[in-house]
Amino acid sequence: LVVAPLAAAMAAGLAGCGFQPLYGNRAQPGDAAFNDFHQIKVATIPERSGQMLRNELLDRLNYRGEPAQPRYELKVTLTEDRRDVLVRSDEVATATDMTLTARYQLVERADGKVLTTGAPRVIARYNVLASPYATLNSAEDARRRAATQLAEDIRARLGVYFNAARGR
């Protein structure tokens, strides 16, 4: 019985603090970063890691399908590095860190102007096992997890850019 009035008071306090959601605008319903995301064409990214990242970005930015007449193009250069981090006394690696770094540019297609850039980096660890097949699967899973994390990071950064560009 005491919880409901307390929750209402907290909600009222948050309403006046100036909090705004990243992917929306309270002043103009329907005017959200999602509309900006839908105007982005994600350029092809080479290699398997790049294909995974591009697919993740398409899922997060172009959930309605790729735009017919995109206003922006997202260009990404992806690098993948590996480093053994756990090594047994006989110098055999048992764990490896895979580092994926995505350097991106959001470009306005009309004039080629670079609007924002970034270089998020993700490290995913995987086990090196006795079975080469199991190690390959472990590495592929680490690559997939890293691509998912990078796509989330890029989407958040683009959301921040679009909010700032609108003067929110």
Image (tube, rainbow, N blue to C red):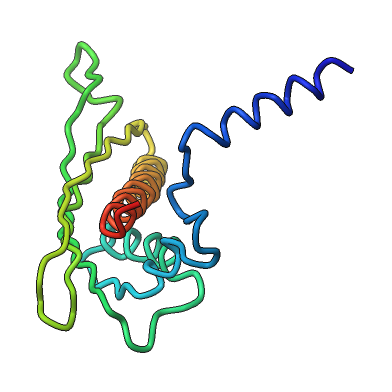
| Quadrant in which residue 5 is drawn | top right
Between 94 and 30, the residue placed more toward the observer is: 30
| Left or right, residue 122 beside residue 103 | right
Q: Residue furthest front?
A: 16
Please give left or right for residue 57 compared with residue 117 in the image: right
Name the image quarter holding the N terminus: top right
Q: Nearer the viewer, residue 50 or 112?
A: 112
Above or below for 135 versus 2: below
Front in this rendered view, residue 75 or 113: 113
Q: Is residue 54 above or below residue 84?
A: below
**In the image, residue 106 lies at what x, y percent?**
20, 64
- Residue 39 falls in which quadrant of the image? bottom left
> In x, y percent, where is residue 156?
36, 49
**Number of numbered callouts drawn:** 0
Q: Residue at x 52, y 54 (%)?
A: 26
Q: Residue at x 34, y 45 (%)?
A: 146
Q: Is residue 83 left or right of residue 27?
A: left
The quarter holding residue 2 reads top right
Which of 136/140 is in front? 140
Instruction: Give me the residue at 39% from left, 82% from top.
Output: 67
Q: Position of residue 60 (x, y in %)?
A: 44, 61
Q: Residue at x 19, y 28 (%)?
A: 84
